[in-house]
Amino acid sequence: MRGALALSLALVAAFPTLASGARTISFPEWFAIRADFAGRTLVWSEAATVRLDPSKGGRDLPAGLRPFVYYRIHTSTAPLDRARRGFVGGPEQHVTLRTQIARMTSGRVAGDGDGRFVIVPGARRFAAPVVFCCTADVETVVVSDGREDAPRPLSATLDGGIVRALLRDRAGGITLVSADPTQRVPELHSAPFPGSATDGLAGLAEGTVAWVDPDTPGTLSFGVPSDGGVVGRRSVRLPGRARRLWVDRGVAVAAVARSRRIALVRVDLTTPRPTIVWQGSRLPHVAIGEGAVVAAEGSSVFAARAGRLRRITRARGQIAAVAASGRRIAWFERVRRKGERRTVVRIARIS
Amino acid sequence: MRRTRTLIATLATAMLTLPAGASALVIPAVQDDALPNVEGAALEARLDALAATGTRVTRVDVLWSQVARRRPAKPRDPDDPAYDWSRYDAILTGLRNRGLGTIVDFYHTPSWASRSGQPSSAPRTADGSRFAAALARRYSGGHRDRSGALLPRIRRIEVWNEPNVAGFYQPQCSRRGRTVVIESPRRYAALLAASYREIKRASPGTEVVGGVLGPAGQTPKACATTGFSVGAIEFAARLARERPPLDAWSMHLYPIGSPEQAFFVPSWNTLSRVLRHVDKLQRGVPVYVTETGYHTSYNRFHRYFVSEEQQAAWLDETYRVASRRPRVRLAMWFNLQDNPFWTGGLIRADGTHKRSYERFRLQAADSPLPEGWGP
């Protein structure tokens, strides 16, 4: 907490207020990143492995100390101007998690229109927490369970101010939990879930839950999450086996395997008719938000608000993450400046 | 030859001073910070649960604001009608009845003594130290409650809790122009010195423990009203300049990394950096680690967490490492049971035992209680 505060103060000092809305900001290092828009802020999580070397800890340390690592997630936000055309400030750090259990990935970040967000770090070997940020700058830990057999969160979102999460137990059973994150100690309401899913193949968003059951990998199921469970469940066939799934309000995008290639299939859940909007050789970074879909493969960024994705740019560096919200998209680009690794965040408008 | 003789002499000295068993010198202990929040049968159940761990010593937080909701007319007199000790009489009597020795700390400023109205406000020295006098007198071993029952004896009082952390003691700093002025060590030194005088006058045999430092490494360069902590080394160094008296030093260690490997300040491997300054106050003063532990899931007060398996292994390692530091007499595991804001317990929130519970029981069973630590 104290370290995070000190770092955020340092970052603020390094990024004085940008009056006119700069199109880019940057920060040191390359991380595994997930990002989303949250109202007039961009929010992202960075996963890193931190190596601590006692040889840099001072001469009076006992002999025989060895380097060791821990695993860290930082979440940061950067404020956008009123039109969300550019940044009006540098990154500010919020929630930080550190563990020595096992590596974490950047997981999932979901923002709402009021600048609040929920994060679920990705973790294979332990049950990651679900954390909401923030009420008066104070985060709320919605789910945190250290038992070895604790249910693992698959996805989480903010749905009308309520945090909802899908938890998968060791036997594969899934529970939809809901909680008011403004409570000091949120009370979890659990509801049964009408299906099964695995990590990466279930997603929650405001008013929407979608999943692919491992027993029927070519079928997308979806419905509306509520405190009592999932209502209005429907299904649609996908043109291939689903490999990953991304969900936003009323829209799902599935990455499906099609003859050694990956296709992104967009499903507008009101219709619902699957449409292939992109094809490539590798699983791309994908984000969806307010009807827009953005994908990045290598250094190329593709996006569209409807239909097939068009190439928006070919960046100088590899893309680490993307975010989308209506006409706004953002991407995180890995560059080298004077030999040092930096991540540049760019924001653009799509028609 | 001379080098060989020196080596043999050094080894012989080391054999005399090192403990034979892993926890021969350090006392394994555990605190249950929920004790002040429960009464009656619930309190008795918690005291039983605490005693069942095998701990022989525990720590109790005396919340000043709970005892003195209004300003006492005679603040040094524990029988002043403004004081309500009922909660602590029950806790300390319950601990004595179960054969547990106790170290107490006091903090949480009542609104009438608070400059800002907040319980984290540093009290006026006179108010804080006179409460220390009342606390020491009531639990001196010779004081009776209204029914005539002899109240327990407390042998050790920690003056405040984490006075280097803004969440417990404010202000930590102030700004003069562009300069950040560190405030808390000087204010705390005055409180510690006055409390020492008052406690010794009320109960000469009671040990006064100073420091009680929270786990802060570097002092931030900017003065913020929240989240600001003075680093343990800097706090100790500044406190040493003020020369308050004390009988023992305490601090809290929550290392990032195993007890053997962690090298951030403060940790077991960097304890000597802090004690270098403490020795300027009183050379060789005993050290009590009155909070240590590892959290087994994420919570917002402690962002570093380990698995339950790591916690159990590192509990053993904590006592092994502590026992190799002869000045460390006590290492208090914090806390007995998890709650939503603290997940470093030996027991989960649902009442089931973590692996660390049995490890602690074995450590406690292996450690006879030294003279002067009983109830």
Image: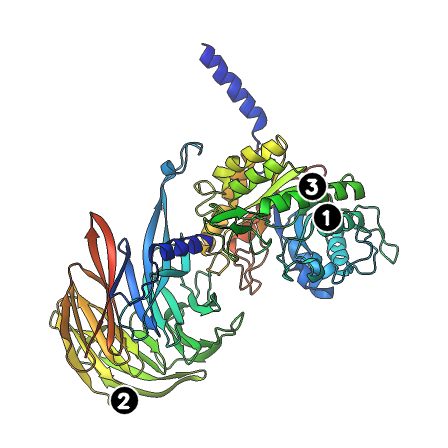
Separation (CA) of disc 3 from disc 1? 9 Å
**Residue in the image at 67% along x and 63% along y:** B37
Separation (CA) of disc 1 from disc 2? 70 Å
Q: x, y percentage for residue A46? A: 32, 59
Would you name the residue on which mark 1 appears?
B129
Would you name the residue on which mark 2 appears?
A270
Q: Look at the picture and state if A176 lies above or below A269.
A: above
At mark 1, the secondary structure is: helix
Of callouts 3 and 1, which one flags the residue occurring earlier in the amino acid sequence? 1
Q: Look at the picture and state if A266 lies above or below B147.
A: below
Residues behind callouts 3 and 2 on a single chain: no
Task: Please identify, in this view, whether the residue under mark 1 or under mark 2 is nearer the observer.
Answer: 1
Does residue B288 show up? yes
At mark 3, the secondary structure is: helix
Q: x, y percentage for residue B23? A: 58, 38
Please state the chain letter of the residue tagged with numbered disc 2 in the rendered image: A
In the rendered structure, the answer to whether residue B242 lies left or right of residue A262 reads right
Looking at the image, the residue that sits furthest to the top is B1
**Residue in the image at 30% along x and 66% along y:** A87
